[in-house]
Amino acid sequence: MMSKAPTHNTLLKNEIRIEQRLAEWAQAFETTIQQMLKPPEAVPQVLAQAMQYSVQGGGKRVRAYIVTRFCELCGGTAKAATPAAVALECVHAFSLVHDDLPAMDDDDLRRGRPTCHKAFGEAVAILAGDALLALAFELLTDPMTDPRLGAAAVLELARGTGWAGMIGGQTTDILSEGDEPSLAVVEHIHRYKTARLLETAGRLGAISAAAGPGLLAAAGAYGDQLGRAFQIADDLLDVTGDAATLGKAVAKDAEAGKQTYPAAVGIEASRKAAGAACDRAIEALNIFGPAADDLRALARFVIERNH
Amino acid sequence: MMSKAPTHNTLLKNEIRIEQRLAEWAQAFETTIQQMLKPPEAVPQVLAQAMQYSVQGGGKRVRAYIVTRFCELCGGTAKAATPAAVALECVHAFSLVHDDLPAMDDDDLRRGRPTCHKAFGEAVAILAGDALLALAFELLTDPMTDPRLGAAAVLELARGTGWAGMIGGQTTDILSEGDEPSLAVVEHIHRYKTARLLETAGRLGAISAAAGPGLLAAAGAYGDQLGRAFQIADDLLDVTGDAATLGKAVAKDAEAGKQTYPAAVGIEASRKAAGAACDRAIEALNIFGPAADDLRALARFVIERNH
């Protein structure tokens, strides 16, 4: 018994540590986001408010954390990662605002607060999402950043976000609702809807540090696998989770006829697949050595969390 | 009598010529657009179809023409202008798809065809608009273009499109519906909703030719004033136009309680304001000499057209 308990406790401690570290980091990052979301004079007040409301919704800032940490692991500074980190959070917020719309997932609540269209109306929510996407590209090409870096970063973000990226994945997700669950379709959705933008986060971190192709590929692979692990775990929480702990409704996927991992292969096979993706994420970090321990803990946290 | 008639006829001929020239140019440009809108393998077919349907809707391609001509006038080639020209048309198409949505202007027809959400459903229309916006930035940073140019072009497009640009203007347009008509509000809407993206078209043309600040400012001023003239003329056509000639419903603005120039200052003062903006657009072309005669004719065409 003694030989097993410490391992478990150590893991548990690591997970608590990464959760705490993320929370502390996210709190400090809010100041950065607020500064970068100060609207120029011409911006209609309601639009700026809807955008700020959507970005400052209390997310875990996992995408921004990944951008920043890979920039640091590749020899860059946290400051160099800031435009890409904030841009990624803008794109993430844009996707949530549009996904929540009545014509899409029709959600009234997000992280315990009214969704953007519930708070500001549907027209403003559509426009706020649009403007957040445009703002992401504006942030990446701010004159303060290296213009050569800016173009590479824009290409990366545009591809990760666009028709062959996250938006394509969301399209497949919406259009396959009600179809017979299929592992191939689920993996396509997970890859594009979720993992692609986390891959982009890793790669944008490396690009922000002007890293070479080896580090770039490793950072991207970590994000991709983390994203797959995260989405399978998210599907599982919808089946096995507790609404009070999660802060959102459960069994919503099944109700909406969503293509999910558990619906396609069952709960046990889903847990195994999440574990395998987590292992591949951790493996991708080998090149970075012990300095990437927080990202290893993050990968484990993602599949072991209950909220 | 003889001294006046030829002037009028010459003007008329110029207008007919620019309309013909634009139509021929637009036809050739369709091939370019089609090539640049070939989807990568991962793109869901319906999404690609909705995007192509929206971009290939038979518009006049005025924005792409302006990008291309200013690139040429600044010493660049039409080929150098292609990424920015297609990107501008993608952004324009994105804005129309989202503006037509039920939560926004709720239009069923656009250029005589069903709007995107009528043809593909609301969810796909929202996503197709989103993906067209992302694609615009992808096109601007295509590895084939100069990366330094790419970042400058992205910043220009992001600002022209975003919260302090076209999307901001559309927000004011939607939110001021039903308010007492006000010239200040109308001018704000015209400036941001319409003129800002045409200013961006001019400036992106100059940027595509790596032009200096003088030419860049002139190209931008032309686009801005052309946009204002165009939007006042458009407001006037909604009051005075013929539905059959226009191919769309008239008196729709008044019905929706839209802020328009004629509603704020009357028809005659609106005609004068459109003429003044047209004059300022033509004046901005002085630096380019007679080579810009087609753009002078375009400015006159914009305020004298009846469709």
Image (cartoon, coloured by chain):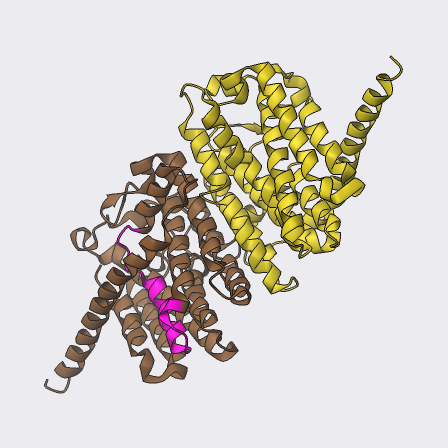
Chain colours: A brown, B yellow
Residue B194 against residue A10 in the figure, above or below: above
Side of A141 relative to B111 (left or right): left
Q: Quadrant of residue B24?
A: top right
Q: As drawn, which residue projects farthest toward the top? A: B1
Side of A236 relative to A258 (left or right): left
Nearer to me, B273 or A100: B273
Q: As drawn, which residue projects farthest toward the bottom? A: A3
Side of A301 relative to B26 (left or right): left
Locate the N terminus of chain A by quadrant.
bottom left
Nearer to me, A73 or A181: A73
Q: Which residues are magenta?
A: A56-79
Residue at (41% x, 75% y) in the render: A76
Residue at (45% x, 69% y) in the render: A208
Residue B93 against residue B237 in the figure, above or below: below
In the rendered structure, does residue A64 fall within the stretch colored magenta? Answer: yes
Q: As drawn, which residue projects farthest toward the right? A: B2
